[in-house]
């Protein structure tokens, strides 16, 4: 769907739905900075054109006035103003001390799988759940600066879960235009690099999302490789792409979705980058660019 397409009934409905969930998810604090106006925010790194045509816009405060949700909504101008993105920061800070809860089996496609796992960590103890959380917030900030509506699958880094099927369901419920699960791998210390995981065909589950998810993966892979200085993984995947049919987070998704394994936490070279806050800013910009490229395809 082109960016300039007028909002249809679907997007209106999902905006209204999202407005409600936004309040719940972010009541504790909004990451929007005072300088978040498009063009003025140094984190708004996406080289995207302005909306081509304002004819369907009601005014400078946004296009959502008719449904009454436009008042304090974060949605407004920007090339991604009618796009909904779900960012899923993998794992959670409380998982390690909630074995029973995260080991229970949940729907994951043809077979059930554990609700969630603890995740990896670097040799110095930087936990993957925290990395995922910190990077996700930076990506969210950038996409919002370009007008996108961004939904996170968890509201902090201290809870347990949600389970993998619930993470997928969040994207399904808001009918996300794209969903991205952010992770870092715990591979062999000798291997480094990133990879993007795409859904393979699973009968009865993923048929509709395989093709668009691959496009999403290709845009993300290209921008991330260019912007992050992390090479394609040299210990698995092929040219940075890995097709999987065993991940509940993909099998249960009805919207285009991929996982990013941003680097290998057990590799010293990758870990040095993942632990560097300045690198995370650059990586987030690259990820946001990749998502935006996909979202602006027609
Ligand atoms: Zn992970």
Image (tube, rainbow, N blue to C red):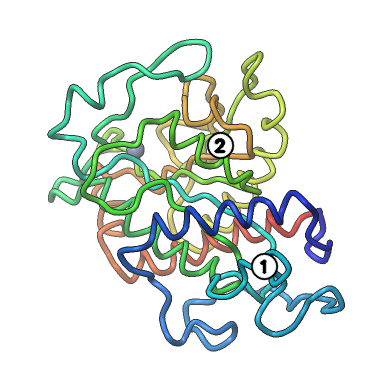
Q: Is residue 123 left or right of residue 42?
A: left
Q: Where is residue 32 in the image (x, y as percent from the top left)?
A: 43, 75
Mark toward the start of the polypeptide (2 vs 1): 1
Mark nearest the camera among 2 and 1 is 1
Mark 2 Cα-neighbour bin, 10 Å: few <14, some 14–19, many ≥20: many
Vertical order, 226 against 116 (above or below): below
Query: Residue at 37% across / 58% down in the picture?
Result: 135
Kind of element beneath mark 2: strand
Q: Position of residue 164 (x, y in %)?
A: 41, 30
Whole-number angstrom distance, CA of label 2 to CA of label 1? 29 Å
Q: Which of 192 and 141 is in front in this view?
A: 141
Could you say which disc has been placed on residue 241 in the image? 2
Q: Does the residue labelled 1 lie within 8 Å of ligand 1?
A: no
Mark 1 Cα-neighbour bin, 10 Å: few <14, some 14–19, many ≥20: many
Vertical order, 190 against 52 (above or below): above
Query: Residue at 63% across / 39% down in the picture?
Result: 256
Q: In this view, does 43 lie to the left or right of 255?
A: left
Exactly how many numbered labels are in the figure?
2
Q: Position of residue 238 (x, y in %)?
A: 55, 33
Quadrant of picture, ligand 1:
top left
Kind of element beneath mark 1: loop
Q: Name the residue under label 1.
A: 81
Q: Which of 175 and 222 is in front in this view?
A: 175
Q: Position of residue 149 (x, y in %)?
A: 57, 61
Indicate the quadrant where residue 144 lies.
bottom right
Contact? badges 2 and 1 (CB < 8 Å)? no
Query: Residue at 63% across / 38% down in the picture?
Result: 255
Vertical order, 9 against 246 (above or below): below
Could you say which disc has been placed on residue 247 in the image? none
Query: Residue at 87% across / 78% down in the picture?
Result: 55
């Amino acid at each position: 769907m082109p960016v300039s397409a007028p909002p249809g009934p679907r997007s209106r409905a999902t905006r209204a739905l999202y407005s409600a969930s936004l309040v719940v998810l972010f009541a504790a604090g909004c990451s929007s900075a005072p300088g978040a106006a498009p063009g003025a925010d140094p984190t708004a790194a996406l080289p995207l054109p302005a909306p081509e045509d304002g004819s369907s816009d009601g005014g400078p405060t946004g296009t959502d006035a008719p449904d009454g949700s436009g008042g304090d909504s974060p949605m407004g101008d920007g090339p991604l103003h009618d796009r909904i993105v779900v960012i899923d920061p993998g794992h959670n800070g409380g998982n390690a001390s909630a074995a029973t809860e995260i080991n229970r089996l949940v729907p994951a496609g043809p077979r059930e799988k554990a609700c969630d796992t603890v995740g990896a960590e670097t040799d110095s103890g930087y936990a993957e759940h925290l990395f995922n959380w910190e990077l996700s917030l930076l990506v969210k900030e950038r996409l919002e600066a370009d007008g996108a509506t961004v939904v996170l699958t968890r509201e902090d880094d201290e809870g347990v879960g949600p389970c993998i099927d619930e993470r997928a369901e969040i994207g399904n419920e808001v009918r996300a235009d794209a969903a991205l699960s952010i992770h870092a791998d715990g591979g062999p210390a000798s291997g480094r690099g990133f990879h993007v995981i795409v859904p393979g065909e699973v009968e009865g589950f993923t048929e509709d999302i395989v093709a668009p998810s691959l496009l999403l993966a290709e845009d993300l892979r290209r921008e991330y490789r260019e912007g992050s200085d992390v090479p394609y993984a040299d210990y698995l995947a092929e040219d940075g792409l890995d097709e999987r049919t065993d991940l509940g987070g993909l099998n249960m998704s009805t919207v285009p979705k991929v996982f990013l394994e941003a680097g290998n936490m057990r590799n010293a070279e990758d870990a040095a980058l993942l632990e560097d806050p300045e690198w995370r800013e650059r990586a987030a910009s690259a990820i946001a660019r990749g998502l935006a490229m996909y979202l602006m395809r027609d």
